[in-house]
Image: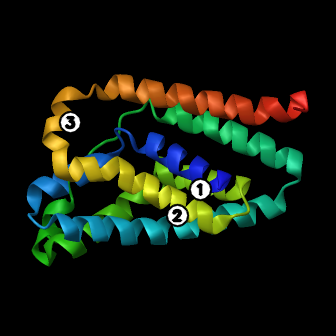
């Protein structure tokens, strides 16, 4: 259960103000079929985060336990700082709109997730927890938790949420998580 909760919370935090969250808002304003967008995000995330979690599990088999702790801790710290860098918007979307809400959303979301903060976080979580299915479920739920509000109330939320403050808070939480990951084993608690 710890893997599921850690994945859910980490990915939800990493997704705040991320390009895929902004992409979700854009898709929701472009297409009327909210369910098609949700299903596309769900499928794209399951595929991407499934591969990422198993990749993390494989990576963890290559490192000694102490090396894994440092890698995971430093990776959380790196993701924390990465959260402070605003994402750039891509402009290649217009060509895909002719394929409808599901196909367009699936393709754009899949491409946007490659090398994204949440993908990196899922690799880290996969390396940290051997319960890969829980990591995939938690990270997928985290993506949905962060993106569903953008589909249904995106314009309203964008006017009221300070993305810069949200990114700084998420950064601080990832830094604390990274430091705790490295520091707690040293304290032998």
Above or below 109: residue 102: below
Q: Would residue 17 be seen by someone viewing this image from the given angle?
A: yes
- Residue 26, image x, y percentages: 17, 51
SS category of the residue bearing label 1? helix
Position of 142 with respect to 172 (left or right) is left
Which image quadrant: the N terminus?
A: bottom right
Report the mark closest to the observer, 1 or 3. Answer: 1
Residue sitting at 37 percent across and 51 percent down? 145
Query: Label 2 vs label 3: CA separation?
Result: 26 Å
Query: Label 1 vs label 3: CA separation?
Result: 27 Å
Q: Which residue lies under the disc numbered 2?
A: 137
Q: Which residue lies under the disc numbered 1?
A: 4
- Residue 183, image x, y percentages: 80, 29
Residue sitting at 69 percent across and 64 percent down? 131
Q: Earlier in the sequence, mark 1 or mark 2?
A: 1
Query: Quick check: marks 1 and 2 in contact, CB under 8 Å?
Result: yes
């Amino acid at each position: 259960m710890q893997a599921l909760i850690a994945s859910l919370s980490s990915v939800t935090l990493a997704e705040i103000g991320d390009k895929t969250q902004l992409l979700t808002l854009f898709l929701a304003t472009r297409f009327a079929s909210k369910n098609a967008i949700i299903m596309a995000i769900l499928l794209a995330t399951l595929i991407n985060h499934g591969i990422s979690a198993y990749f993390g599990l494989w990576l963890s088999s290559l490192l000694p336990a102490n090396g894994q702790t440092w890698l995971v801790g430093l990776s959380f710290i790196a993701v924390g700082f990465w959260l402070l860098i605003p994402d750039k918007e891509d402009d290649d979307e217009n060509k895909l709109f002719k394929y409808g809400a599901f196909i367009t959303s699936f393709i754009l979301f899949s491409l946007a997730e490659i090398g994204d903060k949440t993908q990196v976080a899922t690799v880290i979580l996969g390396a940290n927890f051997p319960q890969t299915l829980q990591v995939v479920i938690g990270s997928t739920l985290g993506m949905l938790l962060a993106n569903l509000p953008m589909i249904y109330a995106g314009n309203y939320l964008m006017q009221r949420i300070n993305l810069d403050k949200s990114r700084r808070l998420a950064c601080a939480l990832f830094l604390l998580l990274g430091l705790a990951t490295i520091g707690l084993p040293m304290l032998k608690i």
